[in-house]
Amino acid sequence: MTVTGSRLPQTICLPRREVLKGGAGLAGLLMLGTAPARAQGTPVSGGTLRIAQGTDAQPKNALAGRAGNNSWRHNVFDTLTVLDSTTGEPRPILATEWSSSEDGKSFVIRLREGVTFHSGRPFTAEDVVFTLEQVKVPENASQMRPIVMGYTSVEATGTHEVTITSDKPVAPRIFDVFQLAVILDKDTMSGLADGSKVIGTGPYRWADWVPGASFRLERNDAYWGEKPHLDAVDVSVITDPTAMANAVRGRADLVLAMTPRDAAMFSGDPSIELFQSPGGQIFPLGLNVTAPPFDKKEVRHAVGFAIDRQRIVDQLFNGVGDGSPLWWPSNVPGMTDAHTSYYKYDPERARKMIADAGAAGAEVEMTVIGLAPVPALYEIVQNNLREVGLAPTGGVVETAAFDQRQLAGDLGPAFMQIHGLQGFSAATLADALPALRDENPSKFNPPEYRQLKDKVQAATGDDYAAAMRELAEFMLDAAFSHILVHTYPLNAKSARVQGLVYDNVGYLHLSGAWIGA
């Protein structure tokens, strides 16, 4: 099987393009499309796009899914392919074509020629090999590490050709790997640690970074594809949600990932367009199955029934969210209403289960990532647990320290995480999400779990739906990680901003963006 093409990032198809004006109100937003408006008029060259976001860039984690990197990573760096936000199909970028052996265990990628890094060095197959080797380095925190670790070899079989072999079929999960594995410059990799050298092949160059405050991208005039319209992109890091939402009325043209409550403040403002982008986040409550009282499955089940998910959706997200306990969208093949309603809120049942298990009054140490809105979510969760007879203690941990503990699998008996990567296949999420991968902080990894994941990852067609159903039911019963809520990105932009493009996972591509009059 061979696929060829030469489409560029700015031609990625988007979902429906309806726009919500501020005057339509938040309820209208939920009923309309999930992408920015279709560009109007002729693109204008020049100008600086001003973006506000709530989290800082993390160049040292360029290979990882991090919210602070979503606005810039796929603009400074290129990937081999990108997932179309309408079809989910891979589109060529630095890869021009790819082919798979009949058994799927050998995968050949042919690369675009004439591409240079921002340093001027030519891009070759060795850079792809280097990047995929870096994905395997634990310190780089790539969620795709478990998948790449399964490859038998990644070799440059030509100046512009790479061959990947595996004991299992490589596709289709390899395109999820490519989506996150931005191609790094092997000569300046060390500069990512402090942001002093962030070198890619993308349409924008990394120009400046003031950690915790702002960063700047500038147009790459030597870009191999169609040249960007914008001169520069300035990104301000504003940690206060209300201040960030207010920024679109003065200091920003585009505000990313607002809370629904703050998005509602634009009601009646015709100059502001609200839109929902692809991707999203899930908020899990993890339970260490080796630590009392969660070494008893009935206590873990009780926690599932103790959580008031609808209160979380209504109180923290203004009704914009999904309280399904699944780790992937409810429309994944094989999922039914029985799965999405598996843990209905039933505090009386939870209280009895905890008492019957002899766990009433048990102290539960919780480790909570200090990234909004998780601390507010923790307030609801700890109240829910108190109501059913548990005694939660502990609290919020600064994000970088939490990430280090998560990487080490040392988050204690109970912990509250935040995961992105929504838009990737469920087969990939089962290994990519820290809460679910084999070396998870819940210490849950029986052989049957791995076997069921392998079954999903090898299945196609109707077999895939059956395998997904079996995996979902096993995980719901094991109850080692409870999903509290799924949320979706809400953004606001000036009507002057045109040509925004999001891929399937919600990463922003700005090569075709421009600012109108």
Image (spheres, rainbow, N blue to C red):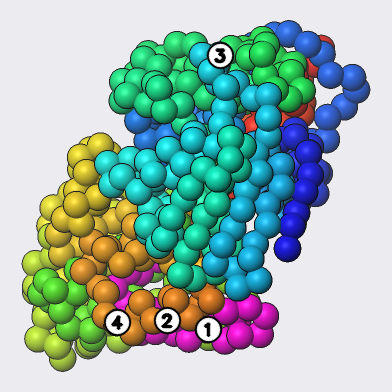
Which label was assigned to residue 447? 4
Instruction: Find the distance from the CA under tag 1 to the CA under tag 3.
Output: 48 Å
Q: Which residue is mark 3?
A: 120
Question: In the figure, 249 relative to 100: above or below?
Answer: above
Query: Residue 485: x and y, percent?
Result: 45, 61
Comparing 208 with 483, the one in front is 208
Q: Which residue is mark 2?
A: 452
Mark 1 residue crowding within 10 angstroms, few (<14) / some (14–19) / many (20+):
many
Q: Which residue is mark 1?
A: 467
Look at the numbered discs 1 and 2 and tell me whether their residues touch, using CB distance below 8 Å.
yes
Look at the numbered discs 3 and 2 and tell me whether their residues touch, using CB distance below 8 Å.
no
Q: Earlier in the sequence, mark 4 or mark 2?
A: 4
Instruction: Find the distance from the CA under tag 3 to the CA under tag 2.
Output: 47 Å
Q: Which residues are magenta?
A: 459-483
Q: Nearer the viewer, mark 3 or mark 2?
A: 3
Question: In the figure, 42 relative to 451: above or below?
Answer: above
Amino acid carrying label 2: it is Leu
Amino acid carrying label 1: it is Ala
Comparing 156 with 196, the one in front is 156
